[in-house]
Amino acid sequence: MQNRRDLLATADQYVDSGQLFEDLSELVACPTVSTDAAMRVAMNSYLDEALRARLERMGFTVQLDLDWQGSGNSFLRAVRTEHHEHPTVLCYGHADVVDGQAGQWDEGREPFVLSAEGDRWYGRGTADNKGQHLVNLKALEMVLAQRGALGFNLVFLFEAGEEIGSPHLQEYAAAHRGQLAADVFIASDGPRLSAEQPTIFLGARGGATFELSVPLRPGGYHSGNWGGLLRNPATTLAGAIGVLVDGHGRIQVPELLPSQLPSSVRQSLEMVKVGGGAQDPALDPHWGDTSLSPAERLYGWNTLEVLALRSADISRPVNAIPGEARAVLQLRFVVGTDMHELEGAIRRALNEAGYPMVQLKMGQCFAASRIDPDNPWVRWASDSVQQTTGMPTVVLPNIGGSLPNEVFEATLGLPTLWIPHSYPGCQQHGPNEHALESVLRQGLKMMCGLFHDLGTRNDLPRTVALTNEKI
């Protein structure tokens, strides 16, 4: 226990000294924007210098695969093998960030310059994902410095395309299945339930974006002369949307819903309270399936949202029936929803309701995945985090958003534990993205405790016999 306490004290000293701020400043300064081809040099530099060098100092063997097979995504794979009888952990992070949106940040802040205002550390990547994977890397360094060894085998996988949909990550994982074999997956991304609540989530909802369009005529026709005689595309579109989701947010097509809410998921969400933070919007109590709690609606069920809606020019309406109307919708769905049947189910529902003229175009679709909250790794990790923080650990079956969890849970067959070091109000992907120093500090201590416990416990669940150092 003394070694564990000393490790947590070291984490506090690292933050108090200003070294965490300095280290994160160096990472934020590298503009690794994956949507901008001109930033590929910066991306490669981040992988090769910021990450490879740090990992090699910790005794990892590193393989860098830039623009793997022309995929537009680059990967860094690092392996540290200590003993074939030790458990093996696969960790993950992503090096890329979204566009900096320079000129849109408050107080003249620059996106790639880390700046502090009280507890908030502003900069692109502070929350998503540089601050989070830096915390995990530093925790590993501290364990190694104290003990001289981890006490477990570790594989680290970084990618450079998470913000553009992780192109070819699944193919890369499948091609390197043996090198990525592990007993458990542990990573940090996304937000906690709230800034105050240490959280573990076990997967991610899937998503399907699609467009409904009603292109009836090349132009508008006078509403006085033709009203009541010509089908109105906007009215038609509103009716078609209502076939899928009613005006109170309730999904109307059974195939767009999961078959059930598993009892283990329901039980894990019983004490979860959504919202209530200073920056959180007030919940609408009569929106969505009110037979479910807010936590069940967000983390255990499906939602269908209208993301955009257009017909004619709302700022300058004229007395004419518009010629066309369009809307973009998105279904967020949990495990138990047949992703491959969504298009057919939507098309049938529209046709049966008398809307064959509404065109359907499916967009990006990604799968849902999660592990069962009763998995023994979940209890072990929850106990470790609680021992460090002295607070109950919130366990979510999945986050409401998306991450490439399916690659690790389904393709690699691993129990997946996500331990985030951010919070819902971090403004990731927008101007003023920030991390909270208090959450980074607590996250660093949590990961120090977790990695310490991994190396000292001999009763952990095992699924692989050893990690092959050959990468």
Image (tube, rainbow, N blue to C red):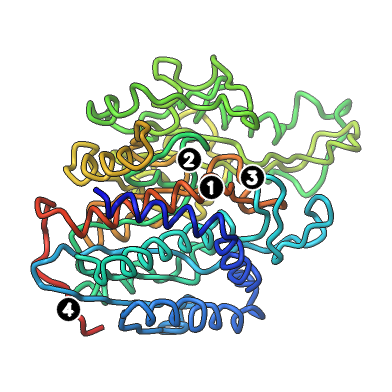
Q: Is 143 left, or right, of 68 in this rendering? A: left
Q: Earlier in the sequence, mark 1 or mark 2?
A: 1
Residue at the image position 12 percent from the left and 52 percent from the top: 461
Q: Is residue 210 above or below residue 286?
A: below
How far apart, in angstroms, are the residues tagged by discs 3 and 1? 39 Å
User: For numbered disc 1, what is the local secondary structure?
Assistant: strand
- Looking at the rendered structure, the secondary structure element under dot 4 is loop
Distance CA(mark 1)–CA(mark 4): 43 Å
Residue ID for mark 3: 119
Q: Nearer the viewer, mark 1 or mark 2?
A: 2
Give the residue at mark 4. 468
Please give the name of the residue rendered at 64% of the width and 29% of the height, measured from the top-left corner. 278
**For residue 367, above or below residue 260:** below
In terms of depth relative to the viewer, which is nearer, 449 or 185?
449
| Sequence-first tag of 1 and 4 | 1
Nearer-the-camera pick, 137 or 96: 137
Q: Earlier in the sequence, mark 4 or mark 2?
A: 2
Label 1 sits on residue: 210
Residue tagged 2: 331
Q: Which mark is residue 68?
A: none
Q: Amino acid at mark 1?
A: Phe
Could you say where residue 214 lies in the image, as x and y percent from the top left?
A: 65, 42
Q: Nearer the viewer, mark 4 or mark 3?
A: 3
Residue 35: x %, y % from top left: 62, 69
22 lies left or right of 288: right
**3D distance between C-alphas at marks 2 and 3:** 35 Å
Asked if the residue at tag 2 contacts the one at tag 1, i.e. Cβ–Cβ closer than 8 Å, the answer is yes
